[in-house]
Image (cartoon, coloured by chain):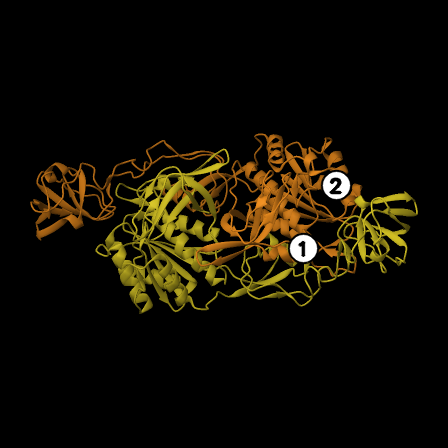
Chain colours: A orange, B yellow
Amino acid sequence: MQTKTFRELVSLQKAQRLCRQRLGNHRVDTERLSLQEAVGRGLSVAVSVRTPLPHFPRAIRDGYAVRARDTFSASPTNPVVLQLTDTVHIGHAPDFVVKPGQAAQIPTGGMLPAGADAVVMVEYTDPMSADQVQIFRPAAPGQYVQQVGEDIPQNEQALAPGAVLGPAEIALLSALGETEVEVYRRPRVGIISTGDEIVAPQHEPIPVQTRDANAYGLAAACRDNGSEPILFGIVRDDADELLSTAGAALGNCDLLLISGGSSAGTQDITRQVLAELTMDEVFIDGIALRPGKPTIVAAHDEKLIFGLPGHPVSALIVFHRLVRPVIGWLIGTEVHDPTQIAQVTRNIPSEAGLTEYVRVKLRRDGDQLWAQPIFGKSASLSTLAQTDGFIEIATGIEGLIEGEQTPVILWR
Amino acid sequence: MQTKTFRELVSLQKAQRLCRQRLGNHRVDTERLSLQEAVGRGLSVAVSVRTPLPHFPRAIRDGYAVRARDTFSASPTNPVVLQLTDTVHIGHAPDFVVKPGQAAQIPTGGMLPAGADAVVMVEYTDPMSADQVQIFRPAAPGQYVQQVGEDIPQNEQALAPGAVLGPAEIALLSALGETEVEVYRRPRVGIISTGDEIVAPQHEPIPVQTRDANAYGLAAACRDNGSEPILFGIVRDDADELLSTAGAALGNCDLLLISGGSSAGTQDITRQVLAELTMDEVFIDGIALRPGKPTIVAAHDEKLIFGLPGHPVSALIVFHRLVRPVIGWLIGTEVHDPTQIAQVTRNIPSEAGLTEYVRVKLRRDGDQLWAQPIFGKSASLSTLAQTDGFIEIATGIEGLIEGEQTPVILWR
């Protein structure tokens, strides 16, 4: 690793493609959940419409149900007068017919009575008496009426497999009466920390020891992205111990993250263990990213195993750019980056041969959002939590100019 | 409502300000959680640093620990030769001193031995023998050494109250050994649906009835935003019934959402009940939004009660723009909008006197992201789930031009 230049490493895009190829069409299992439980999950099958929406013709304005033909000559100066016969009530089927020359009062959501084919908005009417109403505008047939199936026709596909069930999808499924859905279970992500110097966060470190920041940090990132983290603790820099822990973890997980200690020695052990565990090559060995370069990836069947850099900043950035999409693919979806557009507060130089991440703090000044770069070592935890996200400066771009508008990818 | 023009209504910004004023400094209670449970929560107190980070001087590169002064004359053509005495091992305190003219091998993360004050990267060295190493570059004192407290000094504030605990914050807290934190509990949001025509999603509606899309849709939005929805079912268009259900709900919630039926009649009942319940005026009665205009807000002590429009599209948009920030304020945080920048595929006209929301579908074409407006009635559920988010066209802007870059606010 030490000797590879960025030019010899795969790009982030290529690394993503390689991971995707290894996964192929593999998905995690599915389970059947209630709509309340299914929030944020990925749908595993298409949902088709059993009852059309709406399933009766309904008014979409408050006003009068009329026969459109009766209103064709209406104008503000020469209104049509219709006989007011009945009232439609919300939730009740009208038991009358609107005959030529008649109108019935109707509220939004009310069922259009037989005979009527349009609704005139109340604003363009004037009741002359209890049984007569003036109409000041002609109504086209079908005006302000939502026909049966107009929103969603019967048998149409309402949602495709892979749809992530957010508020909009849940609202739609509720309206369709689909109160249970088949979704992918949460991918299980195993997390192992390595390094002779690493102790669990709840331990008081003696000098030379460092508390593990990666296990809980990565677990939080997993939860934020709809997966279920499973922590397998801290393994010393020992190939046998790592092989045994990683092997056991693989049996229980869809994906395994091994965050390296800080030294090159730990990375070497992880590389060796991954090769042994998968009886295969490590298919990604370093990525042209900064930070994040010493990332390695291997696959055991369809289970990807990531050797992540030890520095928390690097580990979380690689999680965001590479592991996060993989979690999405396991449930058949594409992930979006949560982004804010901001103006950079100063020039940011970058090397052209790699994808570079610059952490930034967002600051609002009136209507303008500013992104202030925080240049800290990737070992620096203080800068991590001070920042709101990062700017991705792609390969081939030499940097950003002060005042340039650029997307800031938020940590969450 | 029917007769108010957009010009007579408060703007979204003013509505947000009014809600914030009513809340004042009110926050929900706090609870103590483990780091694993605290993901996504808002911190209620500042966290200060008990152990500085790092708590021992450590190398941040693989190389040789040296006394910087010894290397000042080093150059590629005229290297300095140092005596190689010892090796620092990760996780072990060095039990030796680097004396003048000496160097010790050290890995990244290793503790700097006494005597040494800098690290020379392995790339700029060449071991001549088992006990001699050539140094080709001078090292400044402190080079590649992270000093005690350099990342975060002792007693410094690591996180401020209101910080939302994402992966970065959780990683930082792990490193600091703060494995339990005081966070705000999830705000409890009561949800009531109203309307004589509304039936629960699990029921087969007879003609004239409509399944409730709002309760589960809003509940999903609540979950997406770190709050706990509590469903109080469907109430008919009856003021007494709504008053009793809303009163009971208020006792159990921090915030109450009443989604109206589709008709003006239902809205009138909600307005009347809110005024009675709060013994106060409805302080927001209509907002210059489209969709979302018939939104009303009242307050009972510090509990805000929202009367949301009945159409699911409108209800979810008002949730996103008004309720979501309020949930954030209840836990002391500001919410970000999840945004993607896209080019609009066509001209989008808009009225200048109101904030308008246009639902869009995102489509990637090479490097370019396109936002295609989906114009559907706000009663349309099909367009809701087809779209990825919406464009907010602010008051005073007359629309967007084809090809214009604009932020798309994602549903989630």
Query: Quick check: B354 left or right of B146?
Result: left
In the rendered image, residue A13, in percent from the top left (x then y), is placed at: 59, 35
* Along the viewing direction, whichever of A120 and B272 lies nearer the viewer: A120
Image quadrant where residue B91 sits: bottom right
- Taking the image as drawn, is residue B131 in sight? yes
* Along the viewing direction, whichever of B87 and A365 lies nearer the viewer: A365
Residue A321's disc is: none
Query: Which residue position is annotated with label 2?
Result: A270
Query: Which residue position is annotated with label 1?
Result: A380
Q: Amino acid at mark 2?
A: Thr
In the rendered image, residue B173, in percent from the top left (x then y), is placed at: 64, 59
Could you give the CA–CA distance between mark 2 and mark 1, rounded to whole angstroms? 23 Å
In the rendered image, residue B30, in percent from the top left (x then y), is placed at: 53, 65
**Disc 2 crowd, CA 10 A, few/some/many (<14, 14-19, 20+):** many
Tell me which label, 2 or 1, sits earlier in the chain. 2
What residue is rendered at 90% in x and 58% in y?
A: B99
Image quadrant where residue A142 sits: top left
Q: What is the quadrant of the N terminus of chain B in the image?
A: bottom left
* Helix, strand or loop status at disc 2: helix
* Along the viewing direction, whichever of A407 and B77 lies nearer the viewer: B77
In the rendered image, residue B226, in percent from the top left (x then y), is placed at: 49, 55
Query: Quick check: B113 left or right of B243?
Result: right
Query: Quick check: B58 left or right of A382?
Result: right
